[in-house]
Amino acid sequence: MKIAIMKAPIKDSQIKHYVREYYPLDMAYLGTYLTENKIEVILIDAVIEDLTINDIIERLKNEKVDMVGFTTSLDMFTSATAMMNDVRDAINAVKLQLNIPTFVYGFHATALPEQTLQEIEGLDLVIMAEPELTLLEVAQKALISEKGFDTNNEELQKIQSLAFKKDGEFIKTIPRQMIANLDILPIPNRELLPMKKYQSRPISPPEGQIIFGRGCPFQCIFCAPHVLYGYKHRTRSPENVITEIKALQEKYGIKNFGIMDPTLTISKDAVMKLCQAMIDAKLNITWGCYGRVNVVDEELLQKMHDAGCRWVDYGIESGDDEILKKLKKATNVKQGIEKVELTKKVGINPRVNFLVGFPFETKESIQKTVDLARSLIKEESCITVVQPYPGTELYDTCDKEGLLKTKDWSQYVTLAKLKPRTVMKLPEETEKATVEGLEQIYGVYIKRILSSGNIKLIATKLKHTRLRDYPVMTKKLLKELVR
């Protein structure tokens, strides 16, 4: 049995640039787990390798694979909804030209398994939630017929966390329990993907991206980590993480790391133990992570700093407490301001992020967010238009109440430096305030870049920024530069 797992080619150049920054840990974890269990696997990231659909068809022909799967995640914790049209085109081409079994896994497919099967004619199987154990069972049982997966085989129907069609009927098997002990998963083999091609993300290159845990207990209406990994938070042992860090240091010379959990700081006790293990191991590294303002304190932040943490990314989201309540964020504006200052105090750089464009927002609430963002924003931070990604409470509410403008997935893009693609039906005043708010923050963003005086930084940042998408602010900035 030989399996290809891949990220589909992307047509949109701006989205492609953004996606390139994500090292696909989900693919690396899945490929390594299968390999360790004697399943032959090849991983293909068509985005980082600049491959077309024709290129991947030729690669699959040459490799003579038995089945091919596509991720519907950008990385371990980010949905690839905006890529789903590309995934569809790639799968249909593979099925038409090679006629081999196809499957998908990841956030989008798990959130909408039936719809995904309906929309992608060449798709045979959806692997839902954590994919490692499920795909291994599918591969070991080799339940393949001439037409794809043998859906009439009772053994396939017994495998948990699958979705497929049988005689035109949608079948969804019972959910599989989440992996309780994450240490059973082998450390991802970076050699399965062209490691050196991946761009650095938040810290100066080269950066190693790792995870500490899976699962998130919080209930934010716009966020979807629970779709794949559930609400129960589980972590790797500190020893397991240290082993991975040392391996990346020795093999690739990496000294800067990003711990990519949506919220590293869920469990203070677990993070304190991880940081102490880092200190004891004398790793001589710097790293950053994503945190929440309601679960950090000075003791934790100081320990993180002592262990090498140099940035924490906070989702402040809104400058209006009433909006934060509706988002089920379990935070407030005062907390956000205080914890940003506390993070600075211990010597860690806080990065702050905001969301605007919720259907229940008003002009006044958006301006509060813009004002707070302007007072806190760093060059690395951003304010974006929220998108109702499948699997979130926001998506379900908008779908139920008829607030979705479209289900053309290519429009579901959340990028700070691209023109807002609001897929929700907003009150006219809210939509106008959303665009104007982005214009204001975009101006701050560009001014900070220009004021740096760093020509290389300016060129890099502006290269992938669509100035024409923000005509009002761009016009003002150009006038200032002319003066």
Image: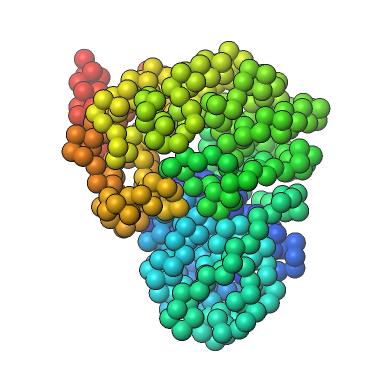
Task: Residue 345 in the image: state x and y as whole percent.
Answer: 58, 13
Residue nearer the viewer, 402 or 205:
402
Q: Residue at x 47, y 40 (%)?
A: 220
Q: Quadrant of the C terminus?
A: top left
Q: Camera-side residue: 8 or 118?
A: 118
The residue lying furthest to the right in this view is 280
Residue at the image point whose x is 67% and y is 63% from the top: 133
Q: Is residue 7 above or below residue 168?
A: above
- Residue 422 falls in which quadrant of the image? top left
Q: Residue 257: where, in percent of width, then height?
A: 63, 35
Q: Nearer the viewer, residue 98 or 27?
A: 27
The structure residue drawn at horizontal position 58% and vertical position 46%, both measured from the top left corner, is 231
Q: Tell me, yes or no, if residue 107 can be seen here.
A: yes
Where in the figure is residue 318, as x and y percent of width and height? 39, 28
Q: In this orientation, which residue lies closer to the viewer: 21 or 117?
A: 117
Task: Give the image location of residue 382, x and y in percent.
Answer: 40, 30
Is residue 274 positioned above or below 24 on the image? above
- Residue 50, can we see it? no
Q: Is residue 472 above or below residue 216?
A: above
Q: Residue furthest top?
A: 345
